[in-house]
Amino acid sequence: MTLPILRMKGLVRHMEAEGVIACPAEAVWGLSCDPFSEPAVAAVLAMKQRSVDKGLIVVAGDIAMLAPLLDGMEEKHRAEMTLSWPGANTWLVPNRGIFPDWVTGDSQDVAVRVTCAPALKALSLALGRPLVSTSANPAGAQPARHAFQVVRYFGAGLPRAWGLVDATAKPSTIRRLGTGEVLRA
């Protein structure tokens, strides 16, 4: 068994045990955990010094993981989203009770995307479900673009996936489904 596979299994076990990991996303390093684990999400929010009211982004390794959100959606909206994935396109969609309040915050919507970041995609697929992915930085600090910045913010003890972020990429665009309103360009 190769080292990356062993490392992946260790990261997945850590998340299954309600742990938080750092992982390179499309443009910055992120903090990831199981969105259905309230203690893990609470740990992410504490690390970021962020209120639960704001909600978090959920990323999936493939579109099938988001099927419960997409089922029954108007075909034109579903097509608009799916044509933008995988990639750095996050959509606010009606949650329909799929994700818990500690993920959605004060909103009835949930922010979702199908990631194209190799490590994040691999972790989601290995875990078999979507993950929380939020920038790896305390509130008010610059998002980490390098692993050393993650260590500076959160210490060397935080488990980290392998990989790099695209230094030329921008954080995902966030749009509201239905209206197309851009909340983050």
Image (cartoon, rainbow, N blue to C red):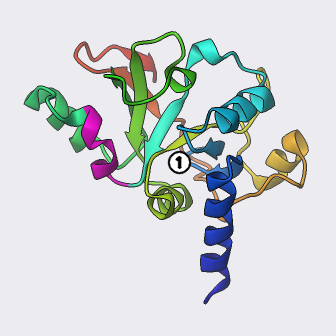
In the displayed structure, does residue 152 sit left or right of residue 68? right
- Residue 142 location (% of width, % of height): 76, 31
Picture quadrant where residue 35 is located? top right
In the image, farthest residue toward the left: 75
Would you place residue 5 above or below residue 83 in this image?
A: below
Q: Secondary structure at mark 1?
A: loop
Q: Which residues are magenta?
A: 62-69
Q: Residues within 10 Å of mark 1 (few under 14, many from 20)?
A: many
Would you place residue 68 above or below residue 15 in this image?
A: above
Report the residue at 25% width, 12% height from top. Answer: 179
In the displayed structure, does residue 80 sit left or right of residue 161? left
- Residue 39 location (% of width, % of height): 69, 35
Would you place residue 158 above or below residue 179 in this image?
A: below
Would you place residue 58 above or below residue 63 in this image?
A: above
Badge 1 is on which residue? 26
55 or 141, nearer to the observer: 55
Report the residue at 79% width, 32% height from top. Answer: 47
Picture quadrant where residue 159 is located? bottom right
In the displayed structure, does residue 31 sit left or right of residue 132? right
Report the residue at 16% width, 28% height from top. Answer: 73
Q: Which quadrant is the N terminus positioned in?
A: bottom right
- Magenta-span inclusion, residue 6: no
- Residue 76 location (% of width, % of height): 10, 29
Q: Is residue 142 visible?
A: no
Three-letter amino acid code at the position of disc 1: Glu
Secondary structure mostly seen in the magenta stretch: helix
73 or 79, nearer to the observer: 73
